[in-house]
Each structure stands twice: as structure tokens, then as C-alpha cells.
Image (tube, rainbow, N blue to C red):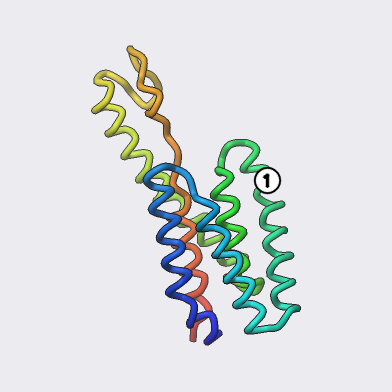
Amino acid sequence: MALHLTFLDLLGGLLAAAVAADVASRRIPNAVVAPIAAVGLGVQWMSGGPAAAGLSALVALGVLALLVLPWMSGKLGGGDVKLIAATAIWIGPSRVLPFLALTAVAGAPVAYATRLFHIVRLRREAPGATPHGCHRALPPAVQETVPMAAAIALGAFAALQWSWP
């Protein structure tokens, strides 16, 4: 566990970069996701050996499989799915279920805040418009998506906190 704490600042910085990119462009760059997965494998290897790293990788594949349907139905973006799986490697198998549950719980306020922002933006850009329709065409940039990287980061740190003494 002490090894996880040593790299906590790195995880925080990478997740902050993912959140910033997701909020700004609704995209999570692979250049942020890949280091989270790589450092996560390294942390797991150093703290528990190759078996721990392998198990973390298998758990991440399971998380990917679990999230294929939400991704295919458009509920989650591809970057969100990759970020969750990469973070699951770092979090470790023993905390993956709390991580997923806490991420889902954190997703609700993030989604509501995004919805509120979208309504305000919609009213500013297209007076007379409602979230359910409008009387004139909206600019193509007005699209409602949720920056789930924020919820993923919150879920990760909550899951890590959950297990600290």
C-alpha cells in the first residue's frame, strides 16, 4: 500500500490532465490513458510481483468487457472506457468493485452539473430553445455529453481512500 501512495501524485496529475481534456474537448487522449495503465502495471508489479500485475491486467480486461455495452449504446465514450480500465489497473483488483461503484455514484452529480450547464448554454445560444427542442436550428457544436473523467477521478480517489488505515 505504501508503494501506491508514493505514486499517488503521478496518478492525480494524470487524472487531472484527463479531466481537463475531457471538460475542454470531450476527449481523453491516449497519451494520458497509456501512462496510467503503464504506471499502474509497474506499481502492481513492484508491490505484488508479476502475479499481481497480471491479475490487475486481467481485471482491467474484465472491466473493458463489462463496459462494452454502455459504450456500444452511446452511454459512455471510448476514452471513458479506456480511462476506467487503465485506472482499474492502478487501483488494483481488491478495490475495483468499490472504484466502479463510487465512479457510478460520482457520475450522477457530474451528469446533473453538465445538464445544467447545457441548458444554460442552450438558452444563451438559441433563445426560445428548450432541452427538448427548439424553434430554430442549433449550431452543431451544441451537443450534450458528460465529462466522465471527473467522475472516474473522484471514484478512484474515493476507492483509494476507502482502504487507507
108 horizontally vs 65: left or right = left
- The residue at 32%/33% (across/down) is 119
Neighbours of disc 1 within 10 Å: few (<14), some (14-19), many (20+): some
SS assignment at label 1: helix
Mark 1 highlights which residue?
68
- The residue at 54%/50% (across/down) is 80
Return the x and y of residue 89 as percentages of the image width and height.
62, 67
51 horizontally vs 119: left or right = right
Return the x and y of residue 157 as percentages of the image width and height.
46, 69
- In the picture shown, does residue 77 fall above or below 158? above
- The residue at 55%/53% (across/down) is 30
Q: Outermost residue, top direction?
A: 135
Q: In which quarter of the image is the N terminus?
A: bottom right
Return the x and y of residue 64 as percentages of the image width and height.
67, 53
126 horizontally vs 62: left or right = left
- In the picture shown, does residue 116 fall above or below 10? above
Q: How many marks?
A: 1
Q: Outermost residue, front direction?
A: 31
47 horizontally vs 152: left or right = right
- The residue at 65%/49% (across/down) is 67
